[in-house]
Amino acid sequence: MKQTLFSYSIMSLFVAIVYIPTFSGEFMLDDNPLIKNNPYIKKAHSLSSYLAQEDGITDVKRTASNYHTGYYRPLVNISYRVDYKIWGMKASGFRATNLILHLLTCLVLYHLIFLFVNDQKAALLAALLFSVHPVNTESVSWITSRNNILVTLFSLLSFYFYLKAPRSIGYHRTVISVFCFILAVLSKEFAVMLLPITFVYQRLAGETGRGIRKEFFGYLPFISIFVIYFFLRQSATGALLSPKNMVDLWPKIYFAPYLIVRNLSCVFFPYGLHSFTVGYPGSFLNWKALGSILVLLLLGFILWGKRKNRWVLFSIVSFLVSLFPVLNIIPTSASSLIAMRWLYFPMSFIFIAVAWGIQKSLSNRRALALSCFSVVLIYFGFYSYILNERLWQNERDFFHREVVQFNNPLYYSGLAEIYLDEKKYRDAEEYFGKSLKYYPNQARSYINYSALLIETDRSEAALSVLSKAEPLTMTDDERGEWFNNKGMAHFRLKNQEEALKNFRKAVTYRPDQATFWGNLGGAYGAVGDYTNSISSLKKGLEMAPDSVELRKNLALTYMKMKNYESAIETLEKIPAPERRSHEEIVALLKEARQKLSDGGI
């Protein structure tokens, strides 16, 4: 017990130190649509509602674009709802939850490794390396990568209790194992690989003399959950797999060794880590492809030599099995063939072999082994701290690092958006141009580029850019922004009827967007339809009651109707300190009071 508490304390201390920078981080990338701007997690819903929700579709009622992500992870959305109840919409709170879940995963991994090596020191050292491994920073510090932590935590728990069940009286550990498997599959698709991993365990390291019949009945509860899971997934997403066709299968199989070796290099030689955008080598005879095949053959030869060491063999084979979903043999919607977050689940299994290596090293050359371990631990911890501080803090630093340091074209558009917000129009236009060159089929770049053109008084050019995006696949969010920007361009060109038509469609796709309602209200006001203008502006204020711009526009509409009392009432709802800081609001309020005192003339 003392050793266990010591192990818990050491891991907690190291994890806390390495991940201190994460608490000052912001929502970034997918955190914004899936958490920060997701109205779904701000309200409680029934369990059936969560089970029917496709991951990445933030409102199950809005399906006008027939867009699908192909992901089904209801437990993740439930966890976001719990976070919101505890922390409110604070990134630091959501990040704290990720960190707590990561620590719990490390503690479970420690106990699982101990089952295999029966050595608490080796188990602690291996789990400690996993806890501060720089590859894991993407899963821990990027909030929406939580699915990788949850699936690993519950899969390891399920496997742990599966291993413990034959040694216990009764079925309580089996029940716990099955329950954890349910939670795992509802967290991420990776969990289904626990079935083949369990099969590998029985073949390589399981109980001797166990009959096929008994083994089959041991799998039966998991297979049943597996079938139910795919039924729910099919119902929610409309497909068993992601929305891509399985084409060019043989080239994918041929290049699988390349991806395996790239992933192994991230685990054992972590450097230059970032948000990868990796494709296949240029040809079948590329030296990287051929070299990877040779490396795998060498690894196979080493494994054959270690075939009597069942723990090492199980560890490495399980790593390869759990890596299968991201070898691109099964189609995915990802833009890269490599990602740090995808290694969180597979890497947990390979650390069983790492623990065995540590155990052997400590028994042979203890001083040298401890020295080497200390160097690696310090390197991992320092590197993770730097990544948490410089890469996973905010979008501006992230995009700048990815584009400037790693020349990652996937984030050209993101950096351009940052420059647009900062009014650096020339830099923004440069990177929008680069983004459209590399990714001509991504609607988001066209939509954001059109916003720049509208803001710099080039509305005709904005309409031309938007027309190129019209046939492209868009989410409901993107389609709403597309219509809004088109409406703004027509509004600037004084085409008020076209502006109205597009603003109406924008709020159809994004009824939760206060800005879109404000634009619609402004367009109604421009054509003299003050009743609909007021109605639209009030809807916007219901969503953004602190918006000074919406209150100002509502007051202006009232003044056009010569309803000065309502205009004054609207403006006076702005807090006095904020009201006094806006000269336009002060002047407008003064004018409304003067008009009212003059008898509304």
Image: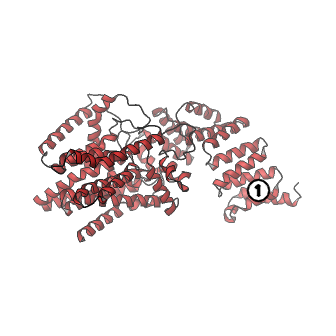
Residue 104 is situated, as x and y percent measured from the top left of the image, at 34, 60
Front residue of 160/25: it is: 160
Residue 180 is situated, as x and y percent measured from the top left of the image, at 35, 55
Residue 56 is situated, as x and y percent measured from the top left of the image, at 48, 45
Name the residue at the left extreme: 364
Residue 62 is situated, as x and y percent measured from the top left of the image, at 57, 43
Tell me which residue sits at (26%, 45%) in the image. Answer: 216
Asked if residue 401 shows in the view, the reply is: yes
- Left or right of residue 370, residue 592 in this image: right
Specify the amino acid type for callout 1. Leu
Name the residue at the bottom extreme: 2
Q: Quadrant of the N terminus?
A: bottom left
- Left or right of residue 120, residue 386 in this image: right
Front residue of 176/153: it is: 176
Tell me which residue sits at (35%, 47%) in the image. Answer: 191
To which residue does mark 1 refer?
588
Up the image or down, 281 lies above or below 224; here it is above
How packed is label 1: few (under 14 Cα within 10 Å), some, or many (20 or more)? Answer: some
Q: Find numbered disc 1 in the image and state the secondary structure of the residue it sits on.
A: helix
Tell me which residue sits at (63%, 54%) in the image. Answer: 543
Q: How many marks?
A: 1
Tell me which residue sits at (43%, 42%) in the image. Answer: 231
